[in-house]
Image (cartoon, rainbow, N blue to C red):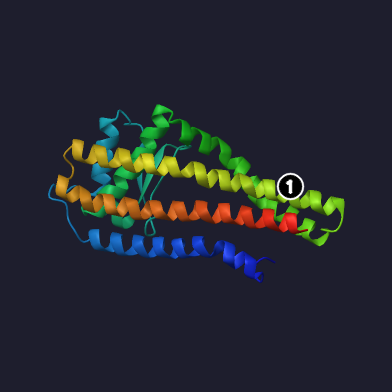
Amino acid sequence: MFYFDINYLIYMLPAILLGLYAQGKVQSTYGKYSRVPSRRGLTGAQAARYLLDSAGLQDIAIERVPGQLSDHYDPRSKVLRLSDAVYTSPSVAALGIAAHECGHAIQHDTGYVPLSFRNNFYPVANIGTNLGWVFIFIGFLLINSDLGKGMFTLGILGYAAAAVFSIVTLPVEFNASKRAMAVLTEKGIITMDESEGAKKVLDAAALTYVAAALSAIMTILYLIGLRRDD
């Protein structure tokens, strides 16, 4: 119902533009540095295994998964999953991504507070997002009544949970990238000049999380504006 409101498009335009830029930046930067092999020649899987073992995380398994940039760490099963290209590639881009996911595993092992909060908050954010739009839709239909306004407010609060999740994700991702860059050079997996390329790949990926957070914030502001107008 919001897509035909020009005000919604005005609110969302900065997030849309940043999101498009971020996606383009990720694809171009990853494409460039996925063709740059590291001098040491370790693949993403080999580097990840070395970094995890060095951190005392021998119990974390590494699995190969299909897809491009589908890499992630699963804290529930304690499995690091690397996409096909990252798993087998010795490129600077692959090493940066693999180390980033190792950073998440280390965060989990050390009890990094923002990560713990995000993981525990995820069910709340998921329920809030799913129910939020239901409440907003009902509230919109009954907006002239007190019940409708109350439902609309509940919907805003529900969607706010998703915004909080997106915002908390930022320090988690930035910290994982910081850990990744430090450990890659510290362990000699990449050289200082190669680290520049790996950092560019991770910085580009971080922009996608910034765009997601901005989108959630602007949506909340738009909904609050609707609530006040009514």
| In the rendered image, the vertical position of residue 2 relative to residue 220, given as above or below | below
Q: Residue at x 24, y 44 (%)?
A: 46
In screen coordinates, is 69 left or right of 192? right
Label 1 crowd (10 A; few <14 / some 14-19 / many >=20): many
Name the residue carrying label 1: 154
Determine if residue 34 is in view: no
Instruction: Give the image location of residue 173, x and y in percent.
Output: 40, 44
In the picture, residue 12 is in which quadrant? bottom right
Instruction: Give the image location of residue 165, x and y in percent.
Output: 54, 44
Q: What amino acid is at disc 1?
A: Leu
**Quadrant in which the C terminus is drawn:** bottom right
Q: Residue at x 29, y 41 (%)?
A: 180
| In the rendered image, the vertical position of residue 121 relative to residue 24, given as above or below | above
In screen coordinates, is 141 left or right of 178? right
Instruction: Give the image location of residue 224, x and y in percent.
Output: 68, 53
- Which sits in the foreground, 33 or 75? 33
Instruction: Give the image location of residue 25, x and y in percent.
Output: 35, 62
**Quadrant in which the N terminus is drawn:** bottom right
Label count reads: 1
Q: Residue at x 36, y 43 (%)?
A: 101
